[in-house]
Image (cartoon, grey):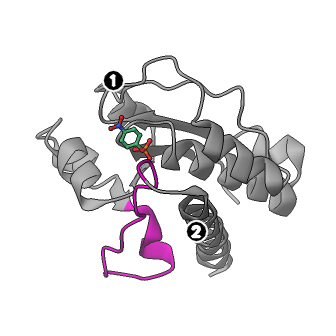
């Protein structure tokens, strides 16, 4: 697969997008091997700066660790204008993230880079990844499963596109 630059975005950058970054990176290594995966740029950010420089939420770390993925080195940051230039795909988790990201720029080429991450699994349905922050542990496992499936589906889609 062609190396791509991908940014995952949620509100706080401590629950959903760090898990998306971790699971996507791990699947990429599984499918492509470490050397090729290193050519991809995978990062995450929040629309807010509420949790600037914080580690992922302990419940996100626990649920990914349960699946063999270590996200403890990630630190929260807020999305910035230069991210629209740097990244090919900006994947948002829900419609509030979508609105907040789109309103950062009037450039339609940049706006076209913004997609709902679950679109690979449910095209054109604008399905949401629920915010697990105020809920219990099971919400984090649910989010992990959704993000893992969506990561698999994007990787599969890109593989197919490059074969035709
Ligand atoms: P995230 O979850 O957007 O998936 O990182 C949240 C984290 C923190 C808050 C809201 C959502 N908060 O209000 O502080």
Q: Which residue is situated farthest in the top direction here?
A: 53
Q: Quadrant of residue 148?
A: bottom right
| Residue 124 included in the magenta stretch of the image | yes
Reading the image, the residue beneath label 1 is 49
Q: Is residue 74 visible?
A: yes
Q: Quadrant of residue 149?
A: bottom right
Q: Is mark 1 within 8 Å of ligand 1?
A: no
Q: Nearer the viewer, residue 10 or 119?
A: 10
The residue mark sitting in front, 2 or 1, is: 2
2 horizontally vs 78: left or right: right
63 horizontally vs 33: left or right: left
Mark 1 neighbour class, 10 Å CA radius: few under 14, some 14 to 19, many 20 or more: some
- Sequence-wise first label, 2 or 1: 1
Mark 2 neighbour class, 10 Å CA radius: few under 14, some 14 to 19, many 20 or more: some
In what quadrant of the picture does the C terminus appear? bottom right
Reading the image, the residue beneath label 2 is 142
Q: Is residue 25 visible?
A: no
For label 2, the SS is helix
Above or below residue 76? Residue 10 is below
Residue sitting at 35 percent across and 60 percent down? 115
For label 1, the SS is loop
Q: Quadrant of residue 2?
A: bottom right
Residue sitting at 58 percent across and 52 percent down? 20
Q: Which residues are magenta?
A: 116-134
Q: Position of residue 114 (x, y in %)?
A: 32, 53
Residue sitting at 58 percent across and 68 percent down? 142
Residue sitting at 39 percent across and 82 percent down? 123
Above or below residue 34? Residue 85 is above
């Amino acid at each position: 697969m062609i190396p791509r630059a991908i940014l995952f975005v949620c509100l706080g950058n401590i629950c959903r997008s760090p898990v998306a970054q971790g699971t996507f990176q791990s699947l990429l290594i599984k499918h492509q091997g470490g050397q090729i995966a290193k050519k991809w740029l995978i990062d995450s950010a929040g629309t807010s700066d509420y949790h600037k420089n914080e580690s992922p939420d302990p419940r996100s770390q626990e649920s990914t660790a349960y699946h063999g993925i270590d996200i403890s080195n990630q630190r929260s940051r807020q999305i910035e204008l230069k991210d629209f230039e740097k990244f090919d795909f900006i994947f948002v988790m829900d419609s509030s993230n979508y609105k907040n990201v789109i309103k950062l720029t009037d450039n339609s080429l940049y706006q076209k880079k913004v997609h709902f991450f679950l679109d690979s699994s449910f095209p054109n349905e604008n399905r949401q990844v629920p915010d697990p922050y105020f809920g219990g542990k099971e919400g984090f496992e649910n989010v992990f499963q959704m993000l893992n499936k969506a990561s698999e589906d994007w990787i599969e889609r890109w593989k197919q596109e490059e074969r035709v």
